[in-house]
Image (cartoon, rainbow, N blue to C red):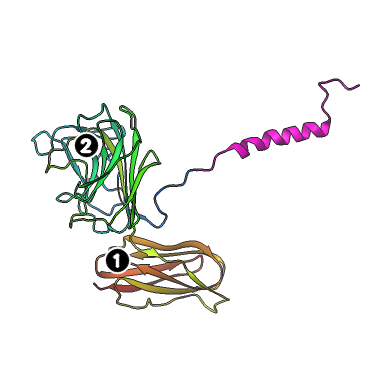
């Protein structure tokens, strides 16, 4: 009779394989960002030691009466209209599109506020969106110049670093705390002309005491519709002139690639700054068409450039509103 501790060689092999595979099976899938893939990062203010935009696109933030600390800027909780009051405010963001955007930031407070207070606000003279910290320790979202409130049960903790996020896709707004959806509502964005994001609103006495940093602003700067594909082997590489041109607000770009490989189609302004990526993928030989919707862009002349392993080609188009 075999002893109870005896295990055959084949069984040992199976147990070893099982031990190797179990961690792979149990490993959770990486969390997917709530920010849509077609949104472009248009401004990033880390606020680590200055108010500069890390993308190099915009002027620095206005930062008054603050100290730079680990995690961002330390705001003193004094009304921004007072001589010693803190103020953190972006310049106007011309590439911002009210029909699709995301605003994200890190924050930490020492204690719960004595009244509901905004963490960040879109708009100065007219608040088109706002992320709020409430006196009961939950987060909320306001819109329509603070006329409409969407509450939540999501709790933030004092003296803990958190991440706040609002995503608006043109019809639905969702707000998040630490990557978990706290609430949502469908509404049109009612807005003024100011495309700024602020931490203090000097108009009504709101105050915020704590750390604020890593402000990231995304926008739908030009969405590409699903690509139409005509299989076949083009004789030559080609990037056609867009049609129509000039256009308002949408146009179609057609191109052909003769070999399988990475393809990147991007749009730039005349300063050479990238404003949209329409295609960034490995594609098979064929002719492709992609539609650009530039509803949120200012009028002007833009470049569009296609890059493959073998070729680079640039053309111009005109958006005329």
Mark positioned earlier in the residue sequence (1 or 2): 2
Q: Residues within 10 Å of mark 1 (few under 14, many from 20)?
A: some
Principal secondary structure, stretch drawn in magenta: helix
Q: Badge 2: few (under 14), some or many (20 or more) residues near its Cα, within 10 Å?
A: many
Front-most of residues 255 and 185 = 185
Residue placed under numbered mark 1 in the picture: 295
> Residue 105, can we see it?
yes
Give the residue at x 17% y 51%. Answer: 126
Q: Where in the figure is residue 159, as x and y percent of width and height?
A: 31, 27
Looking at the picture, does residue 23 appear above or below residue 233?
above
Q: Quadrant of the C terminus?
A: bottom left
Left of 128 or right of it: where is 8?
A: right
Task: Work out how far the residue at label 1 is from the one at label 2, CA to CA, in angstroms.
Answer: 33 Å
Residue with the mark numbered 2: 117
User: Which quarter of the image is occupied by the N terminus?
Assistant: top right
Q: Residue furthest left?
A: 83
Residue 145: x, y in percent? 19, 49
Which residue is depicted at the point 35% across and 43% down? 183
| Residue 150 marker | none
Residue range of the region highlighted in magenta in the rendering: 1-30
Q: Residue at x 44, y 75 (%)?
A: 254
Picture quadrant of residue 73: top left
**Label 1 element class:** loop
């Amino acid at each position: 009779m075999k002893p109870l501790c005896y295990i055959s060689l084949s069984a040992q092999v199976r147990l070893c394989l099982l031990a190797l595979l179990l961690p792979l099976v149990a490993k959770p899938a990486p969390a997917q960002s709530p920010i849509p893939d077609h949104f472009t990062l248009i401004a990033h203010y880390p606020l680590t030691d200055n108010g500069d935009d890390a993308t190099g696109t915009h002027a620095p933030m206005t930062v008054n009466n603050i100290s730079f600390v680990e995690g961002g800027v330390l705001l003193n909780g004094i009304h921004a209209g007072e001589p010693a009051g803190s103020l953190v405010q972006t310049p106007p963001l011309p590439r911002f599109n009210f029909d699709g955007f995301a605003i994200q930031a890190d924050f930490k407070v020492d204690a719960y506020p004595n009244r509901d207070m905004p963490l960040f606000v879109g708009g100065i003279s007219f608040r088109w969106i706002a992320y709020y910290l409430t006196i009961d320790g939950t987060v909320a979202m306001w819109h329509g110049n603070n006329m409409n409130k969407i509450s939540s049960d999501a709790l933030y903790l004092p003296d803990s670093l958190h991440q706040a996020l609002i995503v608006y896709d043109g019809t639905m707004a969702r707000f998040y705390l630490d990557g978990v959806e706290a609430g949502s509502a469908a509404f049109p964005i009612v807005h003024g002309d100011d495309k700024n994001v602020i931490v203090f609103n000097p108009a009504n006495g709101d105050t915020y005491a704590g750390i604020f940093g890593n402000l990231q602003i995304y926008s739908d700067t030009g969405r590409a519709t699903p690509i139409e594909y005509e299989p076949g082997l083009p004789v030559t590489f080609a990037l056609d002139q867009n049609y129509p041109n000039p256009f308002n607000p949408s146009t179609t770009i057609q191109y052909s690639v003769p070999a399988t490989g990475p393809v990147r189609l991007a749009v730039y302004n005349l300063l050479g700054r990238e404003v949209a990526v329409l295609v960034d993928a490995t594609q098979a030989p064929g002719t492709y068409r992609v539609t650009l919707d530039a509803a949120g862009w200012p009028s002007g002349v833009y470049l569009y450039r296609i890059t493959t392993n073998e070729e680079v080609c640039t053309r111009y188009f005109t958006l005329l509103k």
